[in-house]
Image (cartoon, rainbow, N blue to C red):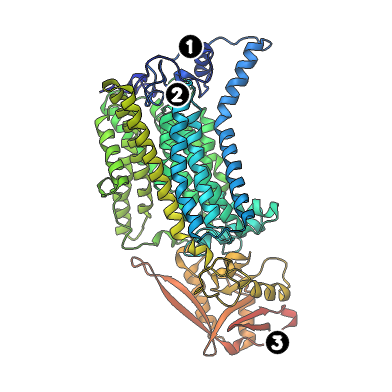
Amino acid sequence: MARVLDAADGHPDPAAYPAEPGGSDNDGPDATRNDRAGAAGDDRSDTVEGTGPGNDDPAGGEAGSDRTPKAVTPASDDSDPTVRADRLRRGLLAVRPLLIAAAVAVVVLAIQLLAIVSGDYHPFSGRVQYGLRAGPLLVGAVAVAAVWWARRRGQSWDADLIPALFGGLGALTLLVGLHGTPFDLYALDGDQLFRTAAVTRFGDSWWGGDYTYRDLPAYYAPTYFWLLGRAGDLAGVVPWHMLKYGTIAVTFLAPIVSYLLWRRVVPVRVAALISVVPFLVPGLNETYAWIVLVAFVPWWLQVGHGLSRPGLRRWHPLVLGAIGAVLFTVYYYFFFVIPIALCLHLLWTRRQGRISWGELTRPLTVLGISALGSSPYWAPLAWNFLTSAHFESLNNRWITLNSGRLALPMLEPSVIGVLCLVGLVFLVVTAREALSRALLVLLVSTYVWHAIGFLFLAVSKPLMSFRMRELVPVVLLAAAAMALVRVAGYAHRHLTAIVVWRLAATGGVLLAVFAGDRFVDVVLADIHHAHNRTLPDGQLPAFHRPEAVAWKPAPAQLSRIIDARYQGPDRPVLLTANSDLLALYPYYGFVQFNANYSHPTGRFKERLAFLGDLGRSTSPAEFAARLRDNPYDRIDAIVLPVKNDKLVFGYRADEFPFGTNPREISLPRNLVQPEHFDITTVDGTLVAVLRPATSGG
């Protein structure tokens, strides 16, 4: 077994991975300058990338060098042309992944434009989908050819290219699949309703706040929705359209972000291999959580364990803290595993008799910086929680029969199951290595969190612990990538170079094709959601199924009526269960139509009780007066369907631990009279805008 990672300083031992005979894997002939760049913290030196001398081993350059990093060269005179050229070269190498990604993005957009111009561009066309399914073959071939060519020339740009290729394939698949519809992949189905409402809210205001209730801070981590909403507003794009573009952008960036963070911990070609993992476990229903998922593991390895590649200068705590702040404000749930992971790590180091305060000081410092950086989100929310007389987190009470399922991907009879099993075996066998041990600690922590979740569930304080299981395949698949590189190194030492290269090339193409095809399958299986959902104007997207039927009334028609009659200074508060109306237009809701979407201090149950009592008003005047003046929010307009002379408010009530159940509250139609309301009926839905008090009877 190869030598272990040096747990004392967190740097991988270069000899723990295969070395490459003869030559170097840098991007220039001057090895001295590369060594100096590596010692100074540049990612691209031959020492940093872990290359030895030679270009025949396909695993070489991916997993460590058998040379130790050289000492930092003393600073030279800035006027020296050699020094300036060296700095320019290092700067270009540092941004090369982004330059390659930009070039791939241009190619993707050019393909999309050519397809539109061709005129025969239908996402459900057999020819179009055939082309998409051929994409993974092309990506696999280009990736393997790039590795072969770069290694023969002693270069490493292939590692930067691979994540960009997969990002480009994913983005192109979504561009093609969503052509002809403004909706995201899952349109307004399920949880997409509140996500769309959040983007709409931030598109209407720099502050935004909760997507339903007036004057409450955002409850869900807001950064992703804020960026989309603000970008849409500034660009003149309808805010909810930005969810589609956000999904495409995240899909393009996920493998690149994964690569940029992992290459701080493992050699660049190992990081490039790990960058394929997001396509093996796509999270297109929650793209903001998906990109945090692939970034969290390598970020935590640097924060909690201080791991980095030899020759790299560790990122300053401010940098890691800033990254943590961004991740937390995009999706915070994975941060809940950190206390468990820290405790397990400290227990292990104590057992080894080498515990030091540095093991705890470094992560606590970074986490403190992250907490400070993310405080614009959590501080107002915490203050709201602490000062509110009524607090009830209904979101955490969402539960299904599937919620208790353990994450055991390593036992599934599938390709991903085999890879996860390989990753688990590798982590167990190499548990003495710092990197493997850190991943094992994180893996075990997810199961500890699951067990803790049941304890809280038993006392009706659920933690939604099932959300943490998404980390399990990401950890195991990353470990599988490291295992494959280790095996390739072993094969290189015992087989001829040509045989090893053939095996590596075959395995690389198969992995690329499998990952790409899996992603294309996921997208093409679900694009019908986006193409068969009714648009705000009541029409259907261009490529809808023949049997699809538009829903009525059209949200745009309802919105025009409300805007024409409402005379208040701010956005009106609506009493409605029309989820599309609240998602697509920046109105406030008097009460959320789903208990699990309601803000913890929104007083969901009390508002429903008020509505029930409101229906017992003795006169239209009393009814209107209570709408204007109640303990919650002034209700400016009613948008409810009329059934049997009743206005019906439908909602989903909390029935923990059995999920939610549909319920209705009925209000007498005769309580809504013209002297108090401006009334219109559209397709069986009553739109009644409350008149100013001075105009009432």
Residue 208 shows in this picture: no
Q: Is mark 3 on a helix, strand or loop?
A: loop
Name the residue at 65% across, 51% down.
Answer: 231
- Assess whether mark 3 and mark 2 are in contact (beta carbons under 8 angstroms): no
Question: Would you place residue 10 above or below residue 423 in this image?
Answer: above
Q: Looking at the image, is mark 2 or mark 3 earlier in the sequence? A: 2
- Assess whether mark 3 and mark 1 are in contact (beta carbons under 8 angstroms): no
Question: Few, some or many C-alpha atoms within 10 Å of disc 2 (few <14, some 14-19, many ≥20)?
Answer: many
- Relative horizontal placement of residue 230, taking residue 608 as reference (left or right): right
The front one of 365 and 643 is 643
Q: x, y (%) of residue 484?
A: 32, 32
Point out the image quarter for the N terminus. Answer: top left
CA separation in Å, label 2 and label 3: 81 Å
Q: Is mark 2 on a helix, strand or loop?
A: helix
CA separation in Å, label 1 and label 3: 85 Å
- Relative horizontal placement of residue 54, taking residue 369 as reference (left or right): left
Label for residue 151? 2
The residue to which callout 3 is attached is 675
Label for residue 71? 1
Three-letter code for the amino acid on which mark 2 is drawn: Arg
Three-letter code for the amino acid on which mark 3 is drawn: Glu
Question: Few, some or many C-alpha atoms within 10 Å of disc 3 (few <14, some 14-19, many ≥20)?
Answer: some
The front one of 629 and 89 is 89
The front one of 605 and 196 is 196
